[in-house]
C-alpha cells in the first residue's frame, strides 16, 4: 500500500505543478470533478488506516491518552478534527459493504456516508436487513444528486420507496432516533484565543436552534441605512444583546455567592483622562474606549483603583440609572433614541451624555437610552447627543456625513 500511495502522491504533485488556466471550460469542470472524486477515495483509505490504528491500540502503546490525541500530534490536527476522524472511521467500518464500496469508488463523500449509515441503521432496526440493503442502493443513488443535509431529510422517508407498507410506523421511529442522535451530539465549545477573543463552535438540537433563532433573528436585522455590519457581525451583536438582557433580569443563578455580573478594573486617574485600559475579572484586557462605554451600563460593576492599586470604588450606585430614574428614561425615550432605530427599552443601556467619569451627574437630563450597537457607535464615532429645548434627545451627525450637522431625532418611539 505504501508504494501505491507514494505513486499517487507523485501524480498529485504533477497536477499541482500544472497550470489550470489553459484548460477549456469542460476540461476544467471534468478536472474538478475528478479531483473531488479522488479526494473521497483517499478519504476512504485514510479512514481505513485510522480505524486500524485505533483498533490496534497504537496510540495508547505510544503513550497517548487516545487515538484522537495521537492524531492531533501526528497529523497536526485540532482535537475536534481528530475526534471527527476517529468517529468517521468507526462509522465507515460499521457501514454496509455496499456503502464502503461506494466511498472507495468516490461515488459518495464521507459526510454522505455518515448520513446514509445513520439512515440505514434506523431502517435495519425497524424493517430488517433485507430492506436496509435496498435502502443503501437508493441512498447511494441519491447521493449523486443531493448534499448531506438534503440527503438526511430525504432519508426520513426512505421507507416510502423501499417498504411503503411500514413507512408510517417507521417514520415515527426514525424521528425518535433522530431526536436521540441530536441529543447525543449536542455540544457547545468555547475556545479562548491568545488575543482574548472567544471562538464558539457547536451543534444545537432542533429545539435549542429554534430558541436561538427566535432570540437573535429579530435583533440581527440592520438598524438603518448607516448600519455597515455584515450578517455575521449582526448575529454576534445580537447574541451579546441577549446576554445583556439576561444579566439585566437578575434571574441567573449566583456565581460564587454573587449575582452574575461583569467586573471591569481600571485606574480612576487614567479613566478620567480617557487613557486607561481596563481588565475583566477573567484577566482579559479592554481598550479605554470600551471601558468608558461599559461604565455606562447598569449591568457592569466598575472596580476603580487608586494610584497604589487600592480599591477606591466597586460599582458606585450613584452612577447607575435604575429604579424610578430608568422608568422615567423609558417613558421619555421609549427605546433606543438613536435616529432610525426601533430597539425597545429592554435592549437598551442608559448612556451618560456627559460621561460619569468626567463628573457627569446621573439624572434624567444627562441620560439617554441606546441599544448596544448604537451605544458602541456613539462612543467610537464623531456623533454627539444632547437634549433639545423640549427635553428630547437629538443627535448631531459628524461633518463628513452632514456638513450642516443638523440634529436628528428618532421617530419610531412614541413619546409623552
Image (cartoon, grey):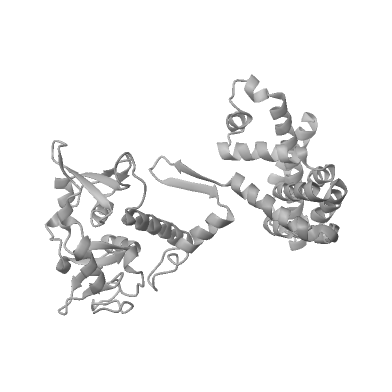
Does residue 71 appear left or right of residue 261 in this picture? right
- Percent x, y for residue 37? 76, 49
Residue 81 quadrant: top right
- Percent x, y for residue 76? 58, 34
- Percent x, y for residue 10? 74, 37
Viewer can see residue 17: no
Residue 392 versus residue 300 in the image, above or below: below
Q: Nearer the viewer, residue 8 or 415?
A: 415
User: Residue furthest toward the front?
Assistant: 169
Viewer can see residue 379: yes
Q: Nearer the viewer, residue 169 or 230?
A: 169
Q: Nearer the viewer, residue 198 or 344?
A: 344
Q: Nearer the viewer, residue 168 or 52?
A: 168
Q: Quadrant of the C terminus?
A: bottom left
Residue 412 versus residue 172 in the image, above or below: below
Residue 93 versus residue 369 in the image, above or below: above
Residue 380 quadrant: bottom left
Residue 196 quadrant: top left
- Percent x, y for residue 119? 75, 51
Does residue 334 appear left or right of residue 32 in this picture? left
Look at 63% across and 22% down and name the residue there: 60
Look at 72% across and 28% down and name the residue there: 55
Amino acid at each position: 500500500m505504501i508504494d501505491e500511495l507514494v505513486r499517487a502522491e507523485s501524480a498529485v504533485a504533477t497536477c499541482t505543478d500544472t497550470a489550470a488556466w489553459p484548460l477549456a471550460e469542460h476540461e476544467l469542470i471534468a478536472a474538478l470533478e475528478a479531483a473531488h472524486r479522488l479526494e473521497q477515495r483517499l478519504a476512504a483509505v485514510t479512514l481505513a488506516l485510522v480505524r486500524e490504528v485505533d483498533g490496534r491500540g497504537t496510540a495508547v502503546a505510544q503513550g497517548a491518552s487516545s487515538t484522537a490525541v495521537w492524531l492531533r500530534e501526528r497529523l497536526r490536527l485540532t482535537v475536534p478534527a481528530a475526534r471527527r476522524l476517529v468517529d468517521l472511521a468507526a462509522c465507515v467500518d460499521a457501514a454496509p459493504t455496499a456503502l464502503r464500496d461506494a466511498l472507495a469508488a468516490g461515488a459518495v463523500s464521507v459526510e454522505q456516508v455518515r448520513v446514509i449509515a445513520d439512515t440505514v441503521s434506523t431502517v435495519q432496526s425497524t424493517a430488517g436487513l433485507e430492506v436496509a440493503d435496498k435502502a443503501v442502493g437508493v441512498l447511494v443513488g441519491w447521493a449523486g444528486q443531493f448534499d448531506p443535509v438534503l440527503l438526511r431529510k430525504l432519508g426520513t422517508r426512505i421507507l416510502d420507496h423501499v417498504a411503503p407498507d411500514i413507512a408510517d410506523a417507521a417514520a415515527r421511529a426514525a424521528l425518535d432516533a433522530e431526536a436521540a442522535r441530536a441529543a447525543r451530539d449536542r455540544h457547545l465549545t468555547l475556545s479562548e484565543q491568545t488575543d482574548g477573543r472567544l471562538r464558539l463552535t457547536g451543534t444545537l438540537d432542533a429545539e435549542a436552534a429554534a430558541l436561538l433563532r427566535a432570540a437573535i433573528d429579530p435583533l440581527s436585522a440592520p438598524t438603518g441605512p448607516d448600519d455597515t455590519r455584515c450578517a455575521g457581525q449582526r448575529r454576534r451583536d445580537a447574541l451579546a444583546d441577549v446576554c445583556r438582557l439576561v444579566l439585566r433580569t437578575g434571574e441567573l443563578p449566583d456565581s460564587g455567592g454573587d449575582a452574575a455580573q461583569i467586573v471591569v478594573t481600571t485606574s480612576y486617574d487614567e479613566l478620567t483622562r480617557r487613557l486607561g485600559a481596563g481588565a475583566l475579572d477573567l484577566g482579559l484586557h479592554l481598550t479605554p474606549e470600551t471601558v468608558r462605554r461599559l461604565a455606562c451600563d447598569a449591568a457592569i460593576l466598575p472596580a476603580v483603583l487608586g494610584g497604589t492599586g487600592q480599591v477606591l470604588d466597586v460599582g458606585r450606585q450613584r452612577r447607575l440609572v435604575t429604579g424610578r430614574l430608568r422608568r422615567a428614561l423609558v417613558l421619555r425615550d421609549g427605546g433606543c433614541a438613536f435616529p432610525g432605530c426601533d430597539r425597545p427599552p429592554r435592549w437598551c443601556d442608559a448612556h451618560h451624555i456627559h460621561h460619569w467619569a468626567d463628573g457627569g451627574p446621573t439624572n434624567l437630563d444627562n441620560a439617554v437610552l441606546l441599544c448596544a450597537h448604537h451605544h458602541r457607535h456613539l462612543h467610537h464615532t464623531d456623533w454627539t447627543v444632547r437634549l433639545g429645548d423640549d427635553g428630547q434627545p437629538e443627535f448631531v451627525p459628524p461633518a463628513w456625513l452632514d456638513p450642516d450637522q443638523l440634529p436628528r431625532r428618532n421617530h419610531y418611539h412614541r413619546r409623552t
